[in-house]
């Protein structure tokens, strides 16, 4: 009887256990498959800098190309054999490029010699017996990734692209029976159990690759018996459902290899970048051995914090590799002699947080935040990492220099800078503060400050849109002016130097930044008209048309100022600041372009006239320090800006192809004691020296020519006459009085015949060079 | 809509091999109706040589084919401004006339037509 009851109980327990086990397996199976077959990994978005373009005629120097190769982790070696290696030679660089999948196709790996002359690249020679090379791109450097809230970063690798040595070493060290077991290896588990019992602690894992993957993939880190049981069960399921190939590939991409702040480094693809700053395929035996060794304890064997320990572990892995015949003893001997080779410092999450801020902002106009974190998008940006880093350095040292010279408390000054391509609006560098490597308040995007005299060119622009009333030498009275304000109040602007300069030629109001003359001019052309031109030239909130706007009582961010000045710099064509060129999917399929957009915002004549005056402001006016310190042939144009009480110091200006905007001030908005000329301008000069712009060669529009004018009176003058300055005038306009020196100019009232000559109707055949039929028809 | 073969009649100063390679690529893409890729190749060329009027003209043609008449005109204007030789003048004015006509600006188109003619 008792026996029967016991039997019944036993049976019930057995059945219940079986049912429970069955249900449990079904649950785990669902979990395993959904994770494995659905989106396996959240792939972070990769963000790339602009690639370096190599071609004959490029202005790149040998040093610049070498520096880029260094940033990309190319190895300088005495012989170039494989992609990712280069050799410096006199006047040349030999390099085997990596090749890269760009938005518009694959740039194949090539072995080339780049020849350099004093002006830049003089030629490219194919050393691989392939097609001649006329133009190619290096792979772009990664400037950051946008990853999930769980902080997993990853560079996906395919099993076929993984060096076989790595896989053999991995299996030799972690799971010798991987190819034959069913997910769990019982002998190994028992051996580990025995060893642990003997030691009285956990000294061996005994887990297979499959179990480790399960652990990384599905489970938390609690070491309970139940967890161990589930782990084994899930490993069996995984092995039953999927091939070894898939499991190994998943493992290679999932395994945890280190920590970088809040970023978890998963997989060998990223691990290779994280520790060696090179793609996995380029690693050598000793480096692969280190990665395999780290798996056991990424924190314990951290090669940066515990190099000795890491080296011991690596050498142990190499020894195992020999005993398991993964490599020959000779190769192992060589590998054992090598240093760890880990790059000094972990690459941060993002190298240029301020620029990344702009990228993120422009991305969110088109992409959902979740997709950015998990779909593995590839973003091709406009940043020039070499220039970016030099601007960061120049800012830090210039601010320290200013503080030193002026006995200011160190660290009180802050700054922001934007460097843009004038034609396209592409942002080449963007710095949000003097500690540029730390994400923080992004002043370039978010510090909205009064722009002071930066607004003045747009007042003169509006005036010069009315050639019947104003030209460059029109006299403007720089005398006390009382401006009525709403509510019966009045405003009496004063000059910065507290001096009234009397009647001055219009151009000097701008080049010397006289307040009274400018306000008088602005009130005459109308504040509304100035507001109109500001808002058609940049995307900024429409400022209220208060008279104080004329002296820059309007707040803008440095990027907005760059937007505004880009329109001037390009001769009146607006191209919004762009940080992104293209976006592709994880496997390189094009998703979206951010095309070059050009819209006419200002007519070319007033834009030209204003730019000429801004050139004079640098040549002889408030920006003259730039003229003194930078090459004269650059013909730079620019304007200082200083806000009330010396709180904000600005400079905005441009050369032929580069525009830079600099703001210097304090975060607490206290007076810094700096004007635009003493704070922002020196830093702007530093930045332009690094940006090396092409010379600004302004082409006068139809009917515009230069006349000599007396600087003091605005009267007509002549070349070589005392105080004579050459200024641009529209046909039919110019000084109506002439001084004592030089011949009076004839003011043609008829428009000039078109300067541009027609090509001869019948070209001599010799001149008929390359005739190209654009649309093939 | 097939734009006129504007660049065909221009005896252009030889472009550098790099620019030529990009211009050729762009022409192939355009012929295949792939304007995005054509524009990308020309923008890449403009980054290498921003003052080249022929590149601005070609990009204007692509924008016209894409139906972006405003950008097409602005780019043709840029080409005109950079065109010291005057070689691209007629082609640009024709393109501007076409852009205006397609945008419904008939007076503007006539004016541009008039500027295209020598005189």
Image (tube, rainbow, N blue to C red):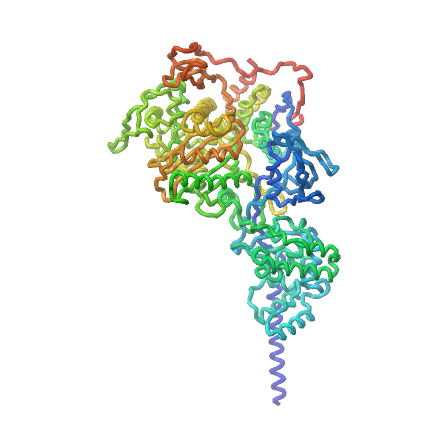
Whether residue A371 is visible to the viewer of this picture, yes or no, is no
Q: Reply above or below: A574 against A216.
A: above
Picture coordinates of residue B1 (x, y %)?
Answer: 60, 29
For the view shown, which residue lies furthest in the left direction?
A488
Q: Quadrant of the C terminus of chain A?
A: top right
**Which of the 4 image quadrants contains residue A93?**
top right
| Image quadrant where one finds the N terminus of chain A | bottom right
Is residue A65 placed above or below B19 in the rendered structure? below
The one of B82 and A374 positioned closer to us in this rendering: B82
Q: Vertical placement of A303 versus A278: above or below?
A: below
* Residue A514 locus on image (x, y percent): 35, 26
Q: Residue pushed farthest bottom?
A: A1
**Can you tell which quarter of the image residue B36 is in?**
top right
Q: Position of residue A632 (x, y in %)?
A: 50, 25
Between A439 and A372, the one nearer to me in the picture: A439
Looking at the image, can residue A447 be seen? yes
Position of A314 with respect to A372 (left or right) is: right
Residue A620 falls left or right of residue A323 = left
Q: How many marks?
A: 0
Tell which of A7 and A540 is nearer to you: A540
**Residue A204: x and y, percent?**
63, 68
**Residue situated in front as seen by the camera: A186 or A298:** A298
């Amino acid at each position: 009887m008792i026996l029967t009851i016991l039997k019944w109980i036993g049976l019930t327990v057995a059945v219940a256990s079986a049912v429970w086990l069955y249900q449990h397996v079904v649950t785990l199976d669902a979990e395993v498959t959904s994770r494995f077959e659905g989106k396996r990994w959240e792939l972070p978005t990769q963000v790339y800098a602009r690639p370096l373009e190599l071609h004959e005629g490029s202005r790149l120097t040998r040093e610049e190309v070498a520096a880029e190769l260094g940033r990309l982790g190319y190895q300088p070696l005495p012989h170039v054999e494989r992609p990712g290696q280069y050799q410096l030679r006199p006047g040349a660089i030999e390099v085997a490029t990596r090749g890269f999948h760009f938005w518009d196709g694959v740039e194949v790996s090539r072995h080339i010699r780049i020849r350099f002359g004093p002006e830049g690249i003089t030629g490219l020679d194919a050393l691989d017996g392939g097609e001649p090379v006329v133009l190619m791109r290096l792979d772009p450097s990664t400037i950051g990734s946008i990853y999930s809230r769980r902080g997993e970063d990853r560079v996906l690798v395919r099993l076929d692209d993984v060096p076989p040595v790595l896989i053999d070493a991995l299996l030799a060290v972690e799971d010798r029976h991987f190819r034959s077991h069913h997910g769990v290896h019982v002998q190994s588990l028992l051996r580990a159990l025995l060893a642990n019992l003997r030691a009285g602690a956990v000294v061996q894992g005994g887990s297979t690759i499959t179990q480790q993957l399960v652990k990384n993939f599905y489970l938390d880190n609690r070491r309970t018996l139940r967890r161990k049981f589930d782990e084994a069960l899930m490993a069996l399921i995984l092995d039953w459902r999927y091939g070894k190939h898939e499991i190994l590939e998943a493992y290679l991409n999932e395994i945890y290899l280190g920590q970088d702040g809040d970023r978890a480094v998963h997989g060998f693809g990223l691990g290779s970048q994280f520790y060696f700053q090179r793609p996995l395929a380029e690693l050598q035996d000793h480096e692969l051995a280190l990665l395999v060794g780290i798996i056991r304890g990424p924190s314990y064997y951290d090669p940066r914090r515990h190099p000795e320990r890491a080296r011991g572990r690596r050498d142990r892995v190499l020894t195992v590799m020999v005993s398991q015949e993964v490599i020959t003893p000779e190769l192992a001997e060589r590998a054992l002699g090598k240093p760890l080779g880990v790059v000094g410092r972990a690459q941060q999450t993002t190298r240029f947080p301020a620029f990344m801020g702009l990228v993120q902002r422009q991305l969110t106009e088109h992409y959902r935040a979740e997709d950015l974190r998990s779909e593995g998008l590839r973003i091709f940006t406009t940043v020039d990492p070499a220039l970016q880093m030099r601007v960061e350095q120049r800012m830090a040292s210039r601010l320290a220099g200013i503080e030193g010279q002026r006995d200011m408390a160190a660290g009180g000054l802050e700054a922001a800078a934007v460097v843009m391509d004038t034609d396209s609006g592409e942002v080449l560098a963007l710095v949000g503060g003097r500690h540029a490597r730390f994400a923080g308040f992004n002043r370039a995007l978010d510090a909205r400050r009064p722009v002071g005299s930066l607004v003045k060119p747009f007042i003169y622009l509006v005036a010069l849109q009315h050639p019947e009333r104003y030209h460059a030498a029109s006299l403007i009275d720089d005398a006390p002016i009382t401006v009525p304000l709403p509510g019966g109040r009045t405003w009496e602007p004063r000059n910065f130097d507290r001096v009234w300069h009397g009647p001055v030629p219009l151009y000097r109001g701008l080049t010397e930044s006289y307040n009274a003359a400018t306000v008088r001019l602005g009130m005459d052309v109308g504040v509304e008209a100035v507001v109109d031109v500001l808002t058609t030239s940049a995307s900024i909130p429409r400022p209220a048309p208060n008279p104080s706007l004329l002296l820059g009582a309007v707040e803008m961010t440095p990027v907005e100022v760059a937007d505004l000045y880009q329109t001037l710099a390009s001769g009146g064509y607006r191209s919004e600041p762009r940080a992104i060129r293209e976006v592709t999917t994880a496997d390189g399929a094009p998703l979206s372009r951010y095309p070059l957009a050009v819209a006419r915002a200002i007519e070319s004549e007033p834009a030209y006239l204003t730019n000429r005056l801004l050139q004079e402001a640098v040549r002889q006016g408030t920006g003259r320090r730039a003229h003194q310190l930078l090459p004269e042939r650059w013909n730079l144009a620019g304007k200082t800006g200083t806000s009330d009480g010396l709180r904000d110091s600005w400079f905005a200006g441009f050369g032929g192809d580069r525009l830079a905007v600099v703001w210097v001030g304090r975060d607490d908005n206290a007076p810094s004691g700096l004007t635009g000329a003493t704070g922002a301008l020196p830093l702007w000069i530093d930045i332009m020296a690094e940006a090396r712009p092409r010379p600004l060669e302004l082409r006068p529009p139809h009917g515009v020519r230069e006349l000599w004018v007396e600087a003091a009176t605005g009267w007509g003058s002549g070349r070589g006459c005392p105080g004579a300055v050459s200024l641009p005038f529209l046909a039919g306009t110019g000084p109506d009085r002439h001084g004592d020196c030089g011949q009076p100019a004839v003011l043609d009232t008829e428009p000039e015949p078109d300067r541009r000559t027609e090509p001869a109707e019948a070209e001599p055949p010799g001149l008929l060079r390359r005739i190209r039929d654009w649309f093939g028809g | 809509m097939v734009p006129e073969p504007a660049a065909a009649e221009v005896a252009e100063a030889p472009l550098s091999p790099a620019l030529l390679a990009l211009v050729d690529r762009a022409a192939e893409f355009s012929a295949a109706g792939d304007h995005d890729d054509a524009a990308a190749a020309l923008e890449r060329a403009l980054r290498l040589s921003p003052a080249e009027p022929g590149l601005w003209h070609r990009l204007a043609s692509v924008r016209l084919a894409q139906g972006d008449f405003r950008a097409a005109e602005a780019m043709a204007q840029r080409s005109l401004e950079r065109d010291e030789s005057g070689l691209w003048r007629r082609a640009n004015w024709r393109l501007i006339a076409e852009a205006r006509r397609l945008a419904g600006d008939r007076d503007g188109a006539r004016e541009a037509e008039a500027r295209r003619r020598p005189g």
